Amino acid sequence: MLGTVTAWVVACGARGELAIDREGAPGLVPDASIPSDTASDAERDDAPDVVASGAVPGGVGGGSGPPGIGAAGGEAGSGSIQPPPPPIRPPPPPTAPVVPPPAPTMMPGTAEDPKISDRCTVIRSQATENECSIELTCAESYIIGRCEMAGGEANCSCDNKRGYAELRLSGVSAMRACEVVAAECDSPTIDPAAPPSCALRHESTGKGSCDADRECSHVVQTVSGVMISTVTSNGVHCNDQVGTWSCGCFGTPADRSFVFETSAQPRDACRQALEICEEAALTPVGTASCEINETVASQNDCRIVHACRVEGTTQSGTDIYSVAFRQALCFAGAPGVEPEPGLPPEESAWSCECRNASGRKSLQPVVSASDSVSACQAAATVCGHF
């Protein structure tokens, strides 16, 4: 049947007319343009090729497509099989630029970890889990530090050329505490000019008298987390003198005695006096008037103490007059040389020094005098300017 239909299509393409033969089968009316079966061999060669047995030529595969599939009696075209293209993927999101982490910064009030200076040499150091001690020599100075652990904190002290200081450490072991204290005493990281943190520690009142003291501290935190606190205790004792209070300070920053007027009750009077004690400087009014308070002398040494009254105004505006003490001390002989026992000193050299609440100072050159009292009197004149 397929061959019959194919022949029919080919016949129609050759512009034949459809006719019914006698036997009832389809037939073709010959066209003059189509060669007959009786055509010569040469005519057949010149005629277009006709697919025999009803077959059509196979298709030719495309360069990149699948091969053609031949019809019945035909031949498949040639071609190469290509893999399907990969799926289209969206472009990756833009990558954020790599930003290096910021350099570590110290919080306000934070300091570098204290380190012992290269100019200092440790000559003794020992430590246990509960305490430590250290001793150093530095250029023109020395440092002695001690610490005891209590409640997770190290209660420490240090002594050097500048004086004595108490410190409290947290976040550090006893093995490390003395190193921190020695470094802090040599080169403080705490700014003493910053306002301290103070708390009243004790106060008491009696008939006509009162006492009060409080603890003040400056605190700094190091990079490694060590908390360093300086600890100072300031105290005062006052006596009521009918409308005025006579008070004496102890501790830092100033050891002084003074008198001020107030109608306050004893507790408030002592608190006001404690504020005056903690003011390191007074604004003087007039000049000081001094009197000898004590004279002590032997053949080879002497001491004269003057009590000086200074009127002034405190930083908070309270008018007071203070009584400050200054001393002149002398020793026979040049520094480091002891006089011969039993021999009175002639007009010779005396080593003298001045002392007051601000500290001490050696007098240079040495004082020349024939006896100890004369030496101290000469020294006292100079100490009045110290």
Image (spheres, helix red, strand yellow):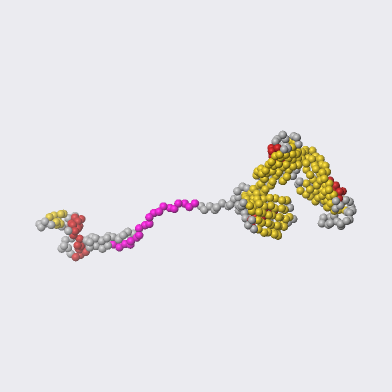
Q: Position of residue 206 (x, y in %)?
A: 71, 39
Q: Quadrant of residue 345?
A: bottom right
Kindly give the residue lying farthest to the bottom in the view shown. Answer: 41
Whether residue 44 appears in magenta in the rendering, the answer is no
Q: Quadrant of residue 37?
A: bottom left
Q: Nearer the viewer, residue 303 or 36?
A: 303
From the viewer's perspective, tell me whether residue 83 is left or right of residue 36.
right
The residue under the point 76% across, 48% down is 359
The residue under the point 64% across, 58% down is 128
Q: Quadrant of residue 334?
A: bottom right
Q: Position of residue 64 (x, y in %)?
A: 34, 59
The residue under the point 69% across, 37% down is 268
Q: Position of residue 99 (x, y in %)?
A: 53, 52
Labels in figure, total: 0
Whether residue 81 appears in magenta in the rendering, the answer is yes
Stretch in magenta: 77-96
Q: Nearer the viewer, residue 94 or 20?
A: 94
The residue under the point 67% across, 49% down is 230
